[in-house]
Image (cartoon, rainbow, N blue to C red):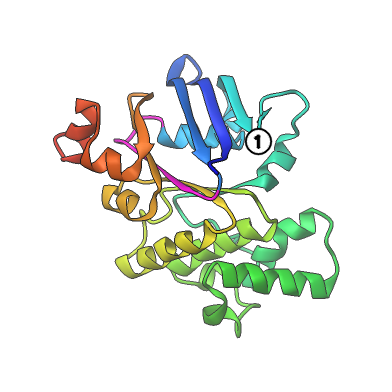
Amino acid sequence: MDEKIIEAIDLNAWFGEKQALQNINMYMQKNMVTAIIGPSGCGKSTFIRCINRMHETIPGAKASGTLLFKTQNIYSRKIDPVILRRQIGMVFQKPTPFPTMSIFDNVAAGLRLNGENNKQRLCDAVEKSLQEAALWNEVKDMLQKPGVSLSGGQQQRLCVARALAVKPEILLLDEPCSALDPISTGKIEELLHELKKHLTIVIVTHNMQQAARVADFTSFFLLGELVEFGKTKKIFTAPTDTRTEQYITGRFG
């Protein structure tokens, strides 16, 4: 049965006076991968930053409309953004391991912030998260080395492991492969197929081939508007809007 886990209803967002999103209406289904494509500056990253309320952390930024997470409006005064971000994790375009921390401590950081201090439970959770991020076999003998000593692709998977450690329900990925080589990109894509068995994933990507490979649903953004949203196969083979067709055939963007 299809189950909506996130739904945007008339979502708008601004940076000061500049409107970045205009009346976005779309949803994400549980345990599916949704890709967001579109040219630079079209509002892709702003949209996913609204989903876990990172957008409002930027000075002068604001949003209006409704964003439902399992039927509850995340912009309700009852919602604590810190708790929300544990449920809706995020991995950024550039790998961001904590520079002064070991591989182990990078993954354990969120758990410790949540009050977990039991050494065995931390060890078990770190191992499980690194396994889920397909990194355990590469780092299990060097957990005390700095996270930043890893390669770019490994650092990105370390950031995925860090996000997974606090057991989120949704994982937001903002162009996670844009700085990676093809082999590392392939590992991240394989990882997404595994993770969606127990997570909902939203990925912003400038790589349309990647969207076609990994996503169940795709949305096309242009100039802050949602032009088209639907099953990935239909978006790429029979789009209903000529702008979508022009973008995916490389006529602009």
Graded by Cα atoms within 10 Å as few (under 14), some (14 to 19) or many (20 or more), the crowding at tag 1 reads few
Residue at image location 40% in from the left, 42% down from the top: 217
Residue 104 visible? The answer is: no
Position of the N terminus, as image quadrant, is top right
Q: Magenta segment: does it hold 185?
A: no
View extreme (top): residue: 17
View extreme (bottom): residue: 141
Which quadrant of the structure image shows residue 82? top right
Secondary structure predominantly adopted by residues drawn in magenta: loop
Residue 181 visible? The answer is: yes
Residue 125's spot in the image, x, y percent? 72, 69
The tally of labels here is 1
Residue at image location 47% in from the left, 14% down from the top: 17
> Which residue bears the numbered disc 1?
70
Left or right? Give the position of 66 relative to 183. right
Q: Magenta segment: does it hold 32?
A: yes
Q: Nearer the viewer, residue 119 or 229?
A: 229
Residue 172's spot in the image, x, y percent? 52, 46
Residue 123's spot in the image, x, y percent? 74, 74
9 lies above or below 131? above
View extreme (left): residue: 251
Left or right? Give the position of 109 relative to 178. right
**Secondary structure under the numbered disc 1 in the rendered image:** loop
Residue at image location 41% in from the left, 68% down from the top: 187
Q: Nearer the viewer, residue 245 or 89?
A: 245
Which quadrant of the structure image shows residue 70? top right
Magenta stretch in the rendered image: 31-43
Residue 85's spot in the image, x, y percent? 66, 43
Position of the C terminus, as image quadrant, is top left
Residue type for callout 1:
Lys
